[in-house]
Amino acid sequence: MTTIKDNLETIRTGINDSCDKAGRDCKEVTLIAVSKFKPIEDLKAAYEAGVRDFGENRVQELVEKFDLMPSDTRFHMIGHLQKNKVKYLIGKAVLIHSVDNLELAKTIQKESLKAGVVTDVLIEVNIAGEETKFGCTKETAVSLAREISKLPNVRVKGLMTIAPYVENSEDNRQHFVALKQLGIDIDNQNIDNVSMEIFSMGMTCDYKVAVEEGATMVRVGTAIFGERNTNL
Ligand SMILES: *Cc1c(COP(=O)(O)O)cnc(C)c1O
């Protein structure tokens, strides 16, 4: 069995190779270790091996782990988010990747104002138009960015997508290209307070292709920590 440290080395090598292939600087790419459902010991092992960015998809789990990790650990909220849970995340999640409707953004605004902070978010786009997935459509992403730009305590930093689960990562290349292009289109509109510097795309099955197509954050769980005992 390989260790978390070994797995991380393999993935970092994969990211570097993809950067070389695409002529990108590998410093542009942040590896987010997706630690959902994994025990704190696993997070600490990854931390020891240099990981500072962790992804969680449930608010309660993120908040619990936040308190147990060193203070320079950064937690990313990558899962579907309910409005009534937002208040627990503010000041703890460094970035909320899963904003896909205005009501949620308005709640983030309200809670961020209360806490006196500005919260960075990504707009989650259902780029392949899968029925089972959260995320706004490509078409509504632009208007959502426009509306969120009016909220002073919420800052749009880019786009996130969860591509389809595929055996062959090449099948998702088109979706990564499409997300990147959407980001360029939104950027060209020069919306105040909105930047398109972050592209959160690519998981265990397809992170290399995502990096080749411009990902600045990849969210990798299984390839680091092994299989999870859940389908969530
Ligand atoms: C679980 C999860 C991941 C990681 O998936 P793996 O296939 O285990 O790498 C990435 N992004 C999101 C939003 C997730 O929920």
Image (cartoon, helix red, strand yellow):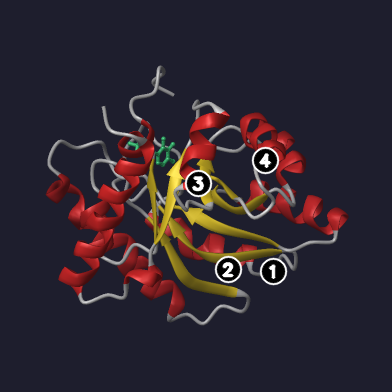
**Cα distance, mark 1 to mark 3?**
40 Å
x 62%, y 30%: residue: 61
* Residue marked by disc 3: 48
Residue 216, x across and y down, in percent: 39, 64
Classify the position of the C terminus by image quarter: top left
> Within the image, what quadrant is residue 63 found in?
top right
Dot 4 amino acid type: Phe
* Residue marked by disc 4: 66
* Residue marked by disc 1: 150
Query: In the current view of this chain or complex, which residue is farthest to the top?
Result: 229
Left or right: residue 65 versus residue 143 is right
**Cα distance, mark 3 to mark 2?**
41 Å
Are dots 1 and 2 in contact, CB under 8 Å? yes
> Within the image, what quadrant is residue 26 found in?
bottom left
* In the rendered image, the vertical position of residue 38 relative to residue 200, given as above or below: above
Determine which of the numbered discs, if any, sits on residue 146 in the image.
2
Q: Secondary structure at mark 3?
A: helix
Which quadrant contains ligand 1?
top left
x 41%, y 18%: residue: 230
Residue 139, x across and y down, in percent: 40, 58
Dot 1 amino acid type: Lys
Determine which of the numbered discs, if any, sits on residue 4 in the image.
none
**Cα distance, mark 1 to mark 2?**
7 Å
Lower sequence index among marks 4 and 3: 3
Residue 8, x across and y down, in percent: 34, 47
Dot 2 amino acid type: Arg
Can residue 77 be seen in this snapshot? yes
Is the residue marked 4 within 8 Å of ligand 1, measured from its CB? no
Lower sequence index among marks 1 and 3: 3
Lower sequence index among marks 4 and 2: 4
**Cα distance, mark 4 to mark 1?**
30 Å
**Front tag of 4 and 2:** 4
